[in-house]
Amino acid sequence: ITGAAFTDLLNINVVGAFIAAREVARRANGDASIVLIASMAYEGGDTNEPAAHYSASKGAIVSLTRQLAVEWAASGIRVNAVEPSMVKTRAAFITTDPVGGPKYLERVPMGRFAEPSEISSIVAFLASDAASYVTGQAIVADGGLMSYGPDGVEAYKRIASMIDKILKGTKPADIPVEQPKKFEFFVNLKAAKQIGGTVPPNVLARADRVIR
């Protein structure tokens, strides 16, 4: 990710959101509601694509939401955000990836991707009078992903194995620290194209999987 690409995305996702929110606040005569779109991507890293700039920008949206909510509350303006996970849109490539999609859903308790209407309904609620006492909040809509945790099944198996060893008399200090057994290197050409980047041929040659 180049510095220019990083800055461009921050300008779009963060500065653009601030300017839009500021204009609403200027024109509002109190009793207004602003809903920004963040992403649960900032809650944890995504190893499948170069997304540091995206995750950072969405984390900034949550911080912006909370700060504006405090600053504008006295003026009757509420500011909230929605943090979706993967939604079935053209931008969420993994939802149509025959390999990556099912692998991702293994960590989603509800076992499916979000529908756009399920995110828009949260936005509608936050914008409505039904949420008149809600401000400064970032509502996560992820099908239970954050509750389940990354690679939950394997993690629970390792924990159960350790507990079993301890119950059978093994001292905790004698249990070896497990190292990763497999590393996979993914290259996402779609994401690279979106940010105007290129992937050198020698990098592509070393990739375990290429998302085109």
Image (spheres, rainbow, N blue to C red):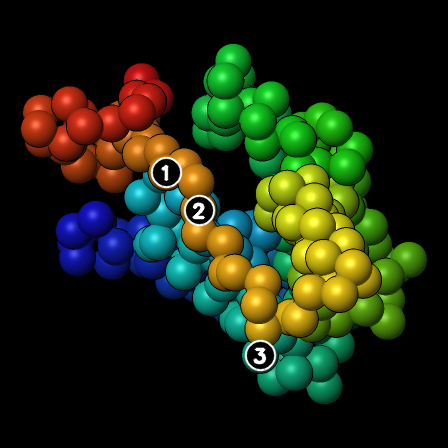
Q: Which quadrant is the C terminus positioned in?
A: top left
Residue linked to disc 2: 180
Q: Contact (CB < 8 A) between labels 1 and 2?
A: yes
Q: How many neighbours does mark 2 have within 10 angstroms: few (below 14), some (14-19), or many (20 or more)?
A: few
Residue linked to disc 3: 67
Taking the spot 75% from the left edge, 65% from the top edge, the residue there is: 169
Taking the spot 41% from the left edge, 37% from the top edge, the residue there is: 182
Q: Amino acid at mark 1?
A: Phe
**The image quarter in which residue 204 lies:** top left
User: Earlier along the polypeptide chain: callout 1 or callout 3?
Assistant: 3
Q: In the image, is residue 166 above or below residue 145?
A: below
Query: Does dot 1 land on a helix, a strand or a loop?
Result: loop
**The image quarter in which residue 208 lies:** top left
Q: Amino acid at mark 2?
A: Pro
Whole-number angstrom distance, CA of label 1 to CA of label 3: 40 Å
Asked whether, in this view, residue 42 is left or right of residue 185, the answer is: right
Residue 31: x percent and y percent? 77, 69
Q: Contact (CB < 8 A) between labels 1 and 3?
A: no
Whole-number angstrom distance, CA of label 2 to CA of label 3: 40 Å
Query: Does dot 2 land on a helix, a strand or a loop?
Result: loop
Which residue ends up furthest to the front in the rendered image?
A: 169
